[in-house]
């Protein structure tokens, strides 16, 4: 079984790219984030024609999560089972303001379904914006709710995969420069502690379990050539319970999918294979790091 996660940064804008990537990598389950669609606008039929069921939990212009599965999907849970979220679609009357990310529990950030005997959870963690801000506090509360949902609803020995954009780097090796990133979100101790508490439920970082190399990231800012200098972070994660983690045989981040044209997502797909390797594909890392090192001056 091939499992992947990808923050597509607008499924409407990236529909063609996602369809091409499905053909390229042939995942059995793809978790997607930041779809920026309402459920009514989710492209169920186009993906069905490609052999994938789409489970979607969206609100409109912002956020949104989904699960694409070609092995079936059942027992769907959204928003931790806490009820509906806001409507942020065009015409809803919801205005962008400094408070638009204050209540992460009123946003479409979690959807779950059982696919092929494994419960998958697609997650889009709040950004947090500024350490110490109300948005940052809301981010930490969201991680607490996720851990409580696991405690209340999931058995530790059950097959489970949590995947998505966690907006946190687990450790310093997951950021291009700890010194330059210090003091910001995604690298702070409170965020990493929240992630560690989540892992302590009994989860394994499936990618890192088989890929210890430094320098491979899943997100690069659009600005200032950060992708071409490989100044990125590994914030897109696949966390697996022990029964699933024991089956992991291969993992990769598809750097090629971060390239345009047209304008790509600022994230790349993270892929994990269970039991045996899936379809081979060029992830673009071969030689890339050497070329980047040759043209980039060392920084702390």
Image: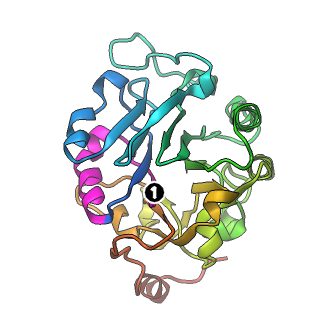
Q: Give percent across and percent down for residue 54.
A: 35, 37
Q: Which residue is mark 1?
A: 4
Q: Is residue 188 left or right of residue 246?
A: right
Whether residue 282 can be seen here: yes
Total marks placed: 1
- Looking at the image, residue 113 lies above or below residue 164: above
The image quadrant of residue 12 is top left
Q: Is residue 246 left or right of residue 25?
A: right
The image quadrant of residue 181 is bottom right
Picture quarter with the C terminus: bottom right
Q: Residues within 10 Å of mark 1 (few under 14, many from 20)?
A: many
Which sits in the foreground, 242 or 43?
Answer: 242
- Looking at the image, residue 175 lies above or below residue 119: below
Kindly give the residue lying farthest to the front in the view shown: 117
Is 237 one of the magenta-colored residues? no
Q: Give percent across and percent down for residue 40.
A: 31, 21
Picture quarter with the N terminus: bottom left
What span is colored magenta in the figure? 1-24
Q: Residue at x 22, y 48 (%)?
A: 50
Q: Residue at x 44, y 56 (%)?
A: 267
Q: Is residue 136 left or right of residue 99?
A: right
Q: Residue at x 49, y 72 (%)?
A: 230
Question: What colour scheme was applied to this rendering of the protein?
Answer: rainbow
Q: Give percent across and percent down for residue 18.
A: 29, 51
Is 4 one of the magenta-colored residues? yes
Q: Is residue 187 left or right of residue 38?
A: right
- Looking at the image, residue 3 lies above or below residue 177: above
Whether residue 101 can be seen here: no
Tag 1, which secondary structure?
strand
Q: Residue at x 54, y 44 (%)?
A: 120
């Amino acid at each position: 079984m091939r499992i992947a996660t990808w923050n597509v940064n607008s499924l409407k804008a990236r529909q063609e790219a996602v369809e091409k990537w499905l053909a390229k990598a042939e995942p059995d389950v793809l978790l997607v984030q930041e779809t920026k669609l309402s459920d009514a606008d989710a492209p169920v039929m186009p993906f069905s024609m490609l052999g994938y069921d789409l489970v979607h939990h969206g609100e409109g212009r912002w956020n949104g999560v989904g699960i694409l599965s070609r092995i079936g999907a059942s027992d769907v849970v959204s928003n931790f089972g806490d009820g509906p979220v806001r409507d942020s679609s065009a015409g809803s009357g919801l205005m962008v303001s400094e408070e638009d990310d204050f209540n992460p529990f009123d946003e479409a950030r979690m959807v779950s379904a059982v696919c092929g005997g494994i419960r998958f959870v697609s997650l889009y963690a709040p950004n947090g914006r500024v350490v110490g801000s109300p948005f940052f506090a809301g981010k930490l509360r969201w991680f607490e709710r996720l851990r409580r949902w696991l405690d209340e609803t999931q058995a530790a020995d059950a097959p489970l995969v949590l995947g998505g954009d966690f907006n946190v780097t687990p450790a310093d090796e997951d950021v291009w420069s700890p010194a330059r990133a210090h003091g910001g979100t995604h690298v702070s101790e409170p965020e990493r502690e929240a992630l560690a508490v989540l892992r302590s439920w009994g989860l394994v970082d499936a990618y890192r379990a088989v890929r210890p190399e430094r320098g491979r990231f899943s997100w690069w800012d659009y600005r200032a050539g950060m992708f071409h200098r490989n100044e990125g972070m590994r914030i897109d994660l696949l966390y697996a319970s022990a029964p699933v983690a024991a089956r992991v045989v291969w993992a990769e981040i598809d750097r090629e999918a971060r390239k345009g044209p047209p304008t790509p997502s600022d994230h790349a797909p993270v892929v994990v294979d269970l039991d045996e390797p899936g379809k081979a594909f060029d992830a673009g890392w071969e030689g890339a790091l050497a070329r980047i090192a040759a043209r980039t001056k060392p920084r702390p």
